[in-house]
Image (cartoon, rainbow, N blue to C red):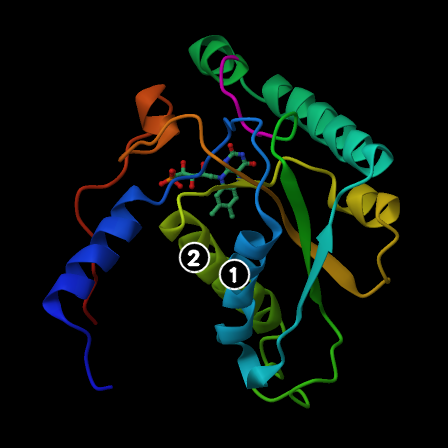
Amino acid sequence: MHAFSDAFQADLETLMRWRRDVRRFRPDPVDEALLQECLDAFLMAPSVGLSEPWRVIRVESSTARAAALANYQAANKDALAGYSGEKSKLYAGLKLSGMQDAPVQLAIFCDEETQKGSGLGAGTMPEMRRYSVVSAIMLFWLAARARGLGLGWVSILDPKQICHDLDVPENHRLVGYFCLGWPEVVADSPELEGTGWEARRGSLPIEVR
Ligand SMILES: Cc1cc2nc3c(=O)[nH]c(=O)nc-3n(C[C@H](O)[C@H](O)[C@H](O)COP(=O)(O)O)c2cc1C
């Protein structure tokens, strides 16, 4: 297949435009087969040296979820303390995770010392492994959105604490904590825009050298 149809290209653009970071979920469960279809995106993702350094932990137990939520709440409190004035008021009103209601929660790590790929491409920039995990997450995000599911990326966390609470090997670095489920609302613009926190750029500045 050399190219995709015009209709597909238009659909793909719509998918990218309507992909959202979701923090408000309906309580309905996510069908296991549907979840698996979304997770299959990891099997198609690019990675440096084909190292596939992603490690996914499904956070299911009430103990693990409570630890993750407490971690987020503490980090969010610290983050709030870093703002003052109007920005502080605005920050306090933001909903920055769906951890209290998302039916599926995943902690995704990068294995920084994977032997897979024999180090190809990661010699001068080992962070490429982490970028590979991010690339895979993007595919997962789109696969989920295409099926009507919403994904929320939570980064307001103490990564060391998460690694400890989930008992991951020493060489695993947290890339993000993800909430997945059926979104309460569907929107074509970021929630942070709606709240007045930040606006998306209307064009891409490109410098030429
Ligand atoms: C690396 C990364 C980390 C993020 N961390 C958080 C977070 O901790 N909490 C949150 O509410 N949103 C988080 N987001 C979502 C962004 O706020 C969101 O992508 C941005 O506002 C644009 O909105 P959109 O994704 O709906 O287009 C994160 C996104 C990325 C890519």
Specify start and end residues of the magenta stretch as a single range: 93-98
Q: Amino acid at mark 1?
A: Glu
> Disc 1 to disc 2, how far (Cα)?
8 Å
Label 2, secondary structure: give it: helix
Of residues 61 and 133, the one nearer the viewer is 61
Q: Which mark is residue 37?
A: 1
Label 1, secondary structure: give it: helix
| Residue occupying the point 63% across, 42% down | 104
Residue that protrudes farthest toward the left in the picture: 6
| Residue occupying the point 49% across, 9% down | 89
From this view, report whether residue 105 is shown above or below residue 42: above
Residue 193 horizontal/vertical position (percent): 32, 27
Of residues 198 and 32, the one nearer the viewer is 32
Instruction: Report which residue position mark 2 lands on.
Output: 143
Quadrant of image for the C terminus: bottom left
Residue 5 horizontal/vertical position (percent): 14, 71
Is there CB contact under 8 Å for labels 1 and 2? Answer: yes
Residue 144 horizontal/vertical position (percent): 45, 51
The image quarter in which residue 201 lies: top left
| Residue occupying the point 69% across, 85% down | 116
The image quarter in which residue 18 lies: top left
Badge 1 or badge 2: first in the primary sequence: 1
